[in-house]
Image (tube, rainbow, N blue to C red):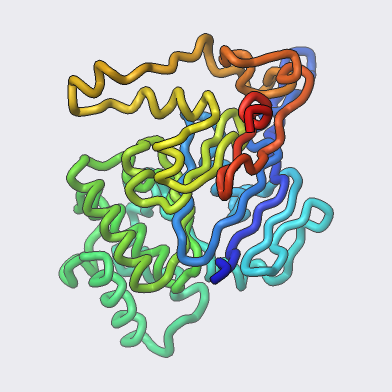
Amino acid sequence: MEKEVLLDVRHLKKYFEVKQAFFKKAYVKAVDDVSFQIYKGETLGLVGESGCGKTTLGRCVLRIVEPTSGQIFFDGNKIYDGDDKTNPKMAEYRKKMQIVFQDPYASLDPRKTVADIIGEALDIHKLYEGREERKQKILELMDLVGLNDEFYNRYPHEFSGGQRQRIGIARALAVSPDFIVCDEPVSALDVSIQAQVINMLEKLQKKKGITYLFIAHDLAVVKHISDRIGVLYLGHLVELTGSEELYENPLHPYTQMLLSAVPIADPDESARRQRVVCEGEVPSPINPPSGCPFRTRCARAGQKCVESCPPLTEVAPGHFVACFDVQEDR
């Protein structure tokens, strides 16, 4: 049975203007010509180094940050086009697309109670008949994410990081969304609490059929929760394939570098493993290298990599790579 596409992103770009000396203008190319699809009911993981554009990409998809150009389709309907940035139906899609933020300490209003934080979306979209129904819906959402009824009138400062993140997830679930961007939702939490939150997200997905874009830098977490994984480098999507396939057969040199840096508990296996070390630092997104963005750190780079940027190409069924060297080998 063919999978249904929920989110279709085409040639998405986001450039931030920065001022330099002598009134010169420059642009930070946070997201640079990224295309991918997410299927209904799946989790697409997105990994990469800090500053590679993961969070910006997630926020552009939801139009929290307006893209510079490209197209975004949600459930077959165009919600963004670089030529026509206004969409009168965007408020309708806000109910279907939500986000769980990275920092549970900064993403909750300290002046509001748990009931007001979770109930805000219910108020905006008028999803209840009276005050009693509103309270009942909030209590159901709290129960869904494992929060006790007694927390109803408490404030965020009274909770731990894991509990605050549960409040943020309940807030996202309040409008019964089809799609949630999880922007590093467990990076600020203890390891034991991370496992609880990840397991809860998986249960919610099975129960409600929610689709996730899961942004993270912890490769072990991403492997556990994701069906497919995309690797982002300097605003470019350099590899995209199934979770198991990526870990067993990474093809892009940057992906190989990332995976070789993951610590292994077994000392014998760790000693046998060959580390892939890349030279140099990550280039500035204001002045990226010509051609392939990774060529300045890649031992396999050739003249073709200097002259043009490799397109994301399917080199095996469901396995996409943006690397001339890999594409020529196939």
Quadrant into which the C terminus falls: top right
Q: Is residue 267 above or below residue 165?
A: above
| Image coords of residue 74 (percent x, y) | 63, 64
Residue drawn at (59%, 34%), measured in percent from left and top?
238
Q: Is residue 82 above or below residue 187?
A: below
| Image coords of residue 256 (percent x, y) | 46, 26
| Image coords of residue 202 (percent x, y) | 32, 60
Q: 261 or 100, which is in the foreground? A: 261
Toward the top, the furthest residue is 280
Toward the bottom, the furthest residue is 129
Q: Is residue 167 above or below residue 246?
A: below
| Image coords of residue 313 (percent x, y) | 67, 40
Q: Is residue 253 left or right of residue 108?
A: right
Q: 31 or 239, which is in the foreground? A: 239
Report which quarter residue 148 is drawn in: bottom left
Q: 12 or 124, which is in the foreground? A: 12
Residue drawn at (23%, 72%), measured in percent from left and top?
143
Residue drawn at (73%, 54%), measured in percent from left and top?
71
Quadrant into which the N terminus falls: bottom right
Residue drawn at (47%, 48%), measured in percent from left and top?
242
